[in-house]
Amino acid sequence: MLSKHIAKRFKGHNVAMNPFCGAGGNAIQLAMKYEKVIAIDIDPNKLEFAKKNAEIYGVRDKINFIMGNFFAIANDLKKYKPEVIVTSTPWGEPSYKNHKTYSLEKNMCSEYDGGGRTIFELAQSIAPNVTLHIPKSTVRNELFKLGKYFNNNIEIQNNFINGKLDSITTFLVDSIT
Ligand code: ADP
C-alpha cells in the first residue's frame, strides 16, 4: 500500500532507484509505474527472492538488480541517472524500538560513518527526489537539516495503521507538487 502510494507520488518520471531493496516489495511497485527500476541489495539471497517475486508480478524485465554495498557503490550508481530514489533502509531492529527518539545519524546503519545522514547525502548526489521510510520517533530536526540539500523542500508523511502512528515517510523533492 505504502509502496504504491510512493510510486504514485512521483509519477511522471521514468527511472527509479531502490537501494536496500530486500525481497523487492518497493522495487516491484515502482516497476508498475516506471519504465526502469534499479534495485540494489548487499545480500545475494535477498536478490534471488526479489527476482523471483518480480517474475511473479510480471515486472522482472523492468528491474535491473545489482548486488553491492550501497555506501561503497553509490558513486557508480550515478550513471543510471535515476530521477527518484525510494528506500526503506535497515532501522536496526529490534533496537530501534528501544529509542524514545531515533537518530538517523546515530541509530540507522550505525556501522557506517554518518548512518542515515550519509544515506541521504549519497542519495541526493544520485537523484533529485529521495524518499526514505523511517521510524516514527525520528528526530524531526535532523530531517529539517537534511532539507538543505533539497532547497528545503521536505514533505513528512505520517503513516497511520488502525489509527496509530506507525512510521514516517519523508519526501525530499526538487519541487513541491
Ligand atoms: P531485514 O529486512 O532482513 O530485516 P534489514 O532491515 O537489516 O534486513 O535490511 C534491509 C535490506 O537492506 C536487507 O535486504 C539487507 O540485505 C539490505 N542491506 C543492508 N545493508 C546494506 C548495504 N550496506 N547496502 C545494500 N543493501 C544493504
Image (tube, rainbow, N blue to C red):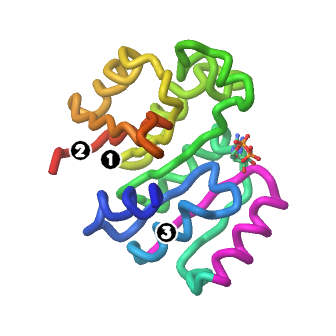
At 84% across and 61% down in the image, what residue appears? 45
| Residue labelled 1 has its Cβ within 8 Å of some atom of ligand 1 | no
Q: Amino acid at mark 2?
A: Asp
- Measured from the top left, where is residue 70 in percent x and y? 64, 44
Indicate which disc, 3 or 2, sits on the residue closer to the N terminus.
3
- Measured from the top left, where is residue 71 in percent x and y? 64, 38
Residue 6 appears left or right of 10? right
Residue 125 in view (yes/no): no
Q: Secondary structure at mark 2?
A: loop
Q: CA distance from mark 2 to mark 1?
A: 6 Å
Name the residue tied to disc 1.
Answer: 128
Q: Main secondary structure of the magenta part?
A: helix
Count residues near mark 2 (Cα–Cα under 10 Å), then give few for <14, some for 14-19, many for 20+: some
The magenta stretch spans residue 49 = yes
Indicate which disc, 2 or 1, sits on the residue closer to the N terminus.
1
- Measured from the top left, where is residue 81 in percent x and y? 42, 59
The magenta stretch is: 36-56
Residue 125 appears left or right of 64? left
Of residues 136 and 145, the one drawn nearer to the viewer in this rendering = 136
Q: Amino acid at mark 3?
A: Gln
The image's mark for residue 29 is 3
Viewer-nearest of labels 3 and 1? 3
The magenta stretch spans residue 63 = no
Q: Quadrant of residue 48?
A: bottom right
Viewer-nearest of labels 3 and 2? 3
The image's mark for residue 174 is 2
